Amino acid sequence: MKVLFIGGSGVISSACTQLGVERGFEVVLLNRGNSQRPVPHGARVIHADIRDPKSVESALENQTFDVVVDWIAFEPRHIEFDIELFRGRIGQYIFISSASAYQKPSTILPITESTPLSNPFWRYSRAKIACEEKLLKTYQADQFPVTIVRPSHTYDETLFPIHGGYTVIDRMRKGKKIVVHGDGTSLWTLTHHRDFAVGLVGLLGNPLAIGQAFHITSDEWLTWDQIYRMLADAAKLDIDIIHVPSESIAAFDSEWGASLLGDKAYSSIFDNSKIKRLVPEYSARIPFAVGAKEIISWYGENKDWQVIDQEFDSLLDRIVNAQENVTLD
């Protein structure tokens, strides 16, 4: 099977590239070649910028593919270009959407693929919804062979799944307060990228996936307090948590606030029955307690990545001071 990944070297996609190669697929990556992650041996790279139509058309020429997966389409115009580029040249087109597109707050848990798509808080999610709508209309009109995949919060050893990343670990080391949104008890789902890869690769070339949407997530549900404490435990550090309403955080930082009010402020747990029916081997086997140790170990070995964002650290100090004053009042 010949598979083209547009992107293919990011946090989520890198594990899928590796697994695809291991399963004997001819994996081709179309990207600009700027990733710091090594390309797995056996994958072929075509250097081109997907946002530059002429360079992409020249790089791909008249090649055909069994499957194309676009990891970096975020706007309907990206989808429109893909449709025109690959129409009649592929057997399956997989769009990587986002579980943040689901209704916020969700009225029924766990979330299934039939949960309405609606996110009035976060433009990123609304754009993903618009992409899905465009693709499904094209599928219904002329059978463009789309499959939609909605990852939730997927991570690897290079990514702290908390806002601020390594800066938060540095604050723990210094004994500073750690900001956790809300009251820390909303439930969240973190998925290791190697687990996600099993589900995604199982959909490649599967005719039963055409015209369908799937989320691929872990079945482990954690509170945000647990997530932060697992990272602290992995780093062998104490943690001093202060809870701050998401709306208050948004007043200090609109972008962070959008990601909270449009996603992370609400409990998000998922029913993975649909992906398991089509890909019976899929099971999320890596708990975050293990993933947290991988992250801390990786950063310990890669000192250059131990970057402290002083501006974000100062922002956290201001948020902490404001919340403490509210508490005193």
Image (spheres, rainbow, N blue to C red):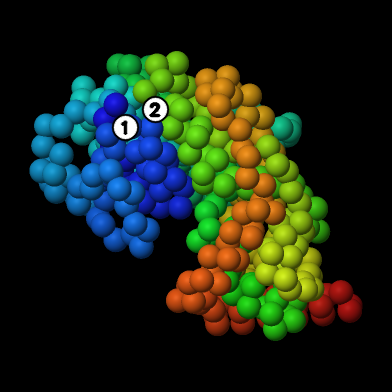
Q: Which amino acid does label 2 sit on?
A: Leu
The percent coordinates of residue 138 (x first, y second) are 34, 23
How much space separates mark 1 and mark 2, taking CA atoms?
10 Å
The percent coordinates of residue 53 (x first, y second) are 17, 45
Of the numbered discs in the image, which one, if any, rests on residue 25? 1
Q: In which quarter of the image is residue 38?
A: bottom left
Q: Quadrant of residue 148?
A: top left
State the residue at coordinates (23%, 47%): 45
Q: What residue does disc 2 label?
A: 204
Is tag 1's residue or tag 2's residue first in the polypeptide sequence? Answer: 1
What SS does tag 2 mark? loop
Q: In this view, does 18 lie above or below 328?
A: above
Q: In this view, does 113 lie above or below 264?
A: above
Of the numbered discs in the image, which one, if any, rests on residue 254? none
- The answer to which of 225 and 262 lies nearer the viewer is 225
Q: What residue type is labelled 1?
A: Phe
Q: Can residue 188 be seen in this view?
A: yes
